[in-house]
Image (spheres, rainbow, N blue to C red):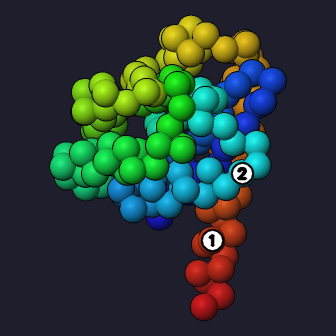
Amino acid sequence: MFKSTYIILEESDIIIEVHKGILTLENIIRYRKKQMEDHKFSPDFHILMDMRNVIIAGKPVNVNDYVSFYLKNKDMMGKRRIAVLTSTPNQVFYTTLFEQHSEHLTQKTRTFSTEEAALQWLNVNITKPELNKILQDLRKEVSAIEDLQQESDNVR
């Protein structure tokens, strides 16, 4: 099961995301399409993705399909930076593969293991304590979504 949530900070031109669970090509594309529908969304907002609680399922070829998705949906791809927080070799492998295959996109993606390095590269107006609080709140939200889903599954 894949769960995600995000917050858009318009004053800082950034979207902060937290993801948890098993990530597939289909559910990340569904997530991106839903995010585009948010009235605050801008393709030029930078993104900080916390993928540290994600297991990436699929084959390396799926990375090319994800790049193709962006090429077919240019309205969601602005001139921005995407910082991906990772913690496992599997996550680093896939995000680095995406970096290498997306060099021709207008957005630039980099993989990081620390919030400090990600914030520095993004060059946004958020302090590390502010980011930590936001990430903590988003993690709680993802856990609450997961709990509701489990309760719903138990009722059936």
Marks 1 and 2, how far apart at CA: 23 Å
Marker disc for residue 38: 2
Q: Secondary structure at mark 1?
A: helix
Q: Secondary structure at mark 2?
A: loop
Residue type for callout 1: Gln
Where residue 81 appears, as percent x and y from the top left, is 51, 23
Closer to us: 20 or 45: 45
Report the residue at 36% width, 56% height from top.
Answer: 25
Dot 1 or dot 2: first in sequence order is 2
Compared across the picture, whether 94 is left or right of 113 comes to left
Residue type for callout 2: Asp
Report the residue at 73% width, 37% height from top.
Answer: 8
Residue 48 seen in render: no
Compared across the picture, whether 104 is left or right of 144 comes to left
Where residue 18 appears, as percent x and y from the top left, is 59, 42
Marker disc for residue 149: 1
Where residue 40 appears, as percent x and y from the top left, is 76, 42
Q: Residue farthest to the bottom? A: 156
Q: Dot 1: within a 10 Å radius of its alpha carbon, few (fewer than 14), some, or many (20 or more) residues?
A: few
In which quarter of the view is residue 58 placed?
bottom left
Closer to us: 150 or 85: 85
